[in-house]
Image: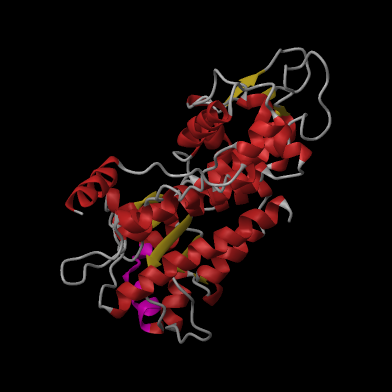
Amino acid sequence: MTARGAFIGPIVDDLDTISSRVRARSKLGFTDLNRILEDFFKELLNLIHKANLVNLNETRRNAPGLNLGDTTSATKRAYQVTSQACSQKMNNTLAKINDVDAELYDEIYVLIIGERQAKYQLDPEEVKRVGFKKRNIIGMTELASMIIASEIDTIRAVYDKLRAELQRITVELEVAIDGKFPTSLTGVVEDRPAVDRSDASLLFADASDLFASREETQAALDGFIDRLELLPRMTRQFLGWLFDNTDLALGLDKPGMLSTGLSANADLVARKHSDQRVLQEDIRLLRSWHFVDCDDDGDGTSPRISIGFPGAHKTSLSEALPNFLIERKLSAETLFSTMNFTVFGPPPVANTPKHATKKKRNAQRRK
């Protein structure tokens, strides 16, 4: 998939999500669009047009029928943002635009948060007075087409804007039913993963020269898992991908780099990752929790991203675990995503709880 394609799909989906929420509100009789939505589309249109649209409601500069306006760019544009797509709404909007604004703006648009109709019956006198054209009625499909036709930097900026704002907007658009809102933290916040742990017997068998006992190996592995399960799933998956793309895993380990060669080329990572904002967020999180560190010698060569093992940093797990995966051709990306560590040995035998042992002794006494 090209970088452009990686952005366009989510952009179209996010615009459709916003449209769906607006459509649901309209069916319940809520056709008003709040200030947050107007400001959001103002910023989105500014990215697309490289314009300076402002929310006219901030000053209410006698601009009925218009929500957004730009009088400082080479092309002076104004927008009415609405959830209604019918001809009556279009004509009402045109009728409300005064002669001063009709003369002031070079282009006047109606942006429908939804889909425009196939045909419109517009008042010819108002169309002529305002200088309006039917093609200036824009729905989400037309907006998406404008984005797709933009330069890649604009597409990336729109993608970042949608990723950053979508959750807040969709929650803002919700309507309470019987005093309750559909979205709660239960549906938004990611749960901690289910973890299948291991007694590390297979790992110890491979690395008995690095650990004193199987129990020590299991304790080191459990310490690392304890820290790993705190990460979001996508961040764990990215960390696993880093493991799979270290110089050691790729067979590029060279003497003198690191004792284990467990580091990745930062330029390679940046070139392969399609979302630089998400990449930097993951790197910051992983670095703050000591899963990775970043080094740049300033000698003109690529910086390095080295892998750490919080929870097991005073053990030999940093050598044993990567070598185990490489020898068996296993993917750390899959391992950290699924959190199933039984590749290192069967599940540990659970200790019998103290209260269960006590009940057993009491039952024997009664006999």
Q: Would you say 235 lies left or right of 166 here? A: right
Question: In this rendering, would 159 be left or right of 241?
Answer: left
**Which one is in front, 232 or 144?**
232
Residue in the image at 83% along x and 20% along y: 254
Say whether residue 348 is magenta. Answer: no
Camera-side residue: 301 or 157?
301
**210 vs 78: above or below:** above
Q: Is residue 98 magenta?
A: yes
| Residue 108 position in % (x across, y down) | 47, 64
Q: Is residue 98 visible?
A: yes
In this rendering, the answer to whether 192 lies above or below 123 is above
- Total numbered badges shown on the rendered structure: 0
Q: Position of residue 240 (x, y in %)?
A: 63, 40
Which residue sits at x=72%, y=17%? Answer: 258
- Identify which residue is drawn at 61% across, 43% down: 345
Residue farthest to the front, as pictured: 367
Q: Which residues are magenta?
A: 88-99
Residue 309's image quarter? top right
At a point 44% along the width and 83% down the height, the residue shown is 122
- In screen coordinates, is 215 left or right of 356? right
Image location of residue 144, percent across then percent down: 57, 64
Q: Which colouring convention does the figure follow?
A: secondary structure
Q: Main secondary structure of the magenta part?
A: helix
Would residue 38 be visible to someone looking at this image?
Answer: no
Quadrant, the N terminus: bottom right
Q: Quadrant of residue 317?
A: top right
Q: Position of residue 367 (x, y in %)?
A: 21, 54
Camera-side residue of 174 and 140: 174
